[in-house]
Amino acid sequence: MARRSGFESFLKAAARASATAERERQRAVRNQLTQARQLERHARMARNQQIRDMREADKLAKREYLEDRIAETSDLNSELSDQVEELGGILAHTLAVNDKINFNGLRRTETFGAFKPLADTIPGEAPAKRTVAAPSGLSKFFPGSKRKYQENLAQAEQDFNAALVKFESQEHAKRERLAALKQNYEERKKQYEAEQQGRNAEVDAFEASYMSKDVDAVVAYSEMVLARSEYPAEGFPQKYKVAYNAQSSELVVEYDLPEPSVVPRVAEYKYVKSKDEIETKARKPTEIKQIYQDVVASIALRTIHELMEADQADAAVLVTFTGVVDTTDPATGRPIRVPVISVRAPKADFTSIRLDKVDKAACLKNLGAKVSARPDELQAVKPLVEFNMVDPRFIDQGEALSGLESRPNLMDMTPSEFEVLVANLFGKMGLDSKLTRASRDGGVDAVAFDTRPVLGGKVVIQAKRYKNTVGVEAVRDLYGTMMNEGANKGILVTTSSYGADAYNFSKDKPVELIDGGGLLFLLREHAGVAARIAV
């Protein structure tokens, strides 16, 4: 029994050990599974976090991209708004500027800079002789001390002499270089002062000529005024021609206007998220027309204002502005110049206008301006003055061609012949004209009838072959005759020009004034006559 009992104890111990081992094995397996699950979970969590990070990054990138596109659209709209605002502020911009040319500002007043020697030409400090101490005390009793002292003294003298020779050579070179620099400086100073005096003399002569109303000086001064005028850079050619009629004190400007394309065709930019595109909204044709008309009117009023404000010599009693568009004819592909506005302004009237308050269209209408109804479509108007007939430079060029073509001089005609010419001209223009007898014309040289219904009627015409400016009295006489005759319109034709008072008197009356340039234009266009006016 004792043996069995011991055996049973052994079996129980073995079973417990086996069970313990099995539990440990299972625990190890469970631990491995747990670790595997943990690793898998951690890996899954890392993957999910990476996905979340990528999604967040992608979401952030998309949000940033969307913000960039919206900002880009906003920038485009801001630029568009600035362009339109700049176009609308063309006239207002010049009102804050003093347009007078400051003649003192044209003169050169700066003095030539003082001479400054270079560092390598400044005199140096002369070398000093090295001091040799004589033997003293017990040292003077040493053998050879006196001889050594004499040798050192001689060497010091030799070194000093050598250094002095070198120093004097260097100083001599410095003095020569300094003298050359001073000579060069004096030559440059002399040249600068001569150029300064020459420039200032030219300015003095220019100012004197301008103040005496010399034609070339007035033209040059006016061109300087226009050249200084600041416009938007894009689309504004800022090209012009200026002429001056001294007899009538009239300044004539032919100014190149921007093309209608200067008005942005886009009204608004809009970002469409679904297409990822920035789309444009077209500006309405009526708005384009309105903006362009405002630009044309602004340039005309601005140019007249600048020239009148700058007129220190009081040379321009009248300013006539014609704005042309230099472009290409879409029908032929050929270059064309289309006048779209022409206005004549007497200084006495214009300077009293509050340009900061006016309606531009109403102001031009009050000035009697000829304005194209559709400048955006380049519909032309007839210029009040034919520029080529005013500028003496162009007349000179025409004279050079006199041998190639017959250009009759209207001033060679008698007054009667000139009256016949004018009557024939209006006949060519479609009026039924009748020349009156000189003995009882009552101031009327021709009576014409416009046979058109409603718009037609009786027209009285007076022709004056004059050399000098036609005054307001002649216009008053014509108006009185027109009223006596019961005419619908009066036309005064001259070979010269009109004064400011004449234009001012006629602007609100059915009276048309045709000056020499206008007469030559009508003869060329309607009668095919290439005439000239030479006093």
Image (cartoon, rainbow, N blue to C red):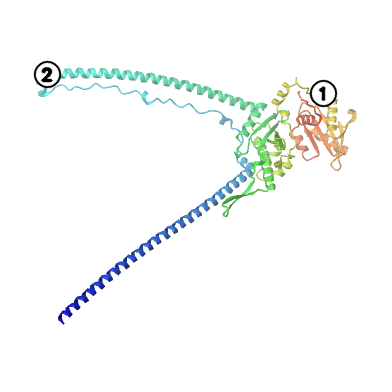
Quadrant location, the N terminus: bottom left
- Residue 164 x/y as whole percent: 28, 18
Disc 1 to disc 2, C-alpha distance = 127 Å
SS category of the residue bearing label 1: loop
Residue for point 85% across, 26% down: 416
Crowding near pointer 2: few (<14 within 10 Å), some, many (20+)?
few
Quarter holding residue 487: top right
Q: Is residue 463 left or right of residue 253?
A: right
* 392 and 20: which is toward the camera: 20
SS category of the residue bearing label 2: loop
Q: State whether residue 319 appears in this view.
A: no
- Vertical placement of 281 versus 198: above or below? below
Looking at the rendered structure, the kind of residue marked 1 is Met
**Residue position for label 1:** 413
- Residue 278 x/y as whole percent: 58, 50
Crowding near pointer 1: few (<14 within 10 Å), some, many (20+)?
few
Which badge, 1 or 2, comes first in the chain's sequence? Answer: 2
- Residue 419 x/y as whole percent: 84, 28
Quarter holding residue 246: top right
* 246 and 410: which is toward the camera: 410
* 278 and 218: which is toward the camera: 278
Q: State whether residue 205 appears in this view.
A: yes
- Vertical placement of 367 versus 74: above or below? above
**Residue position for label 2:** 144
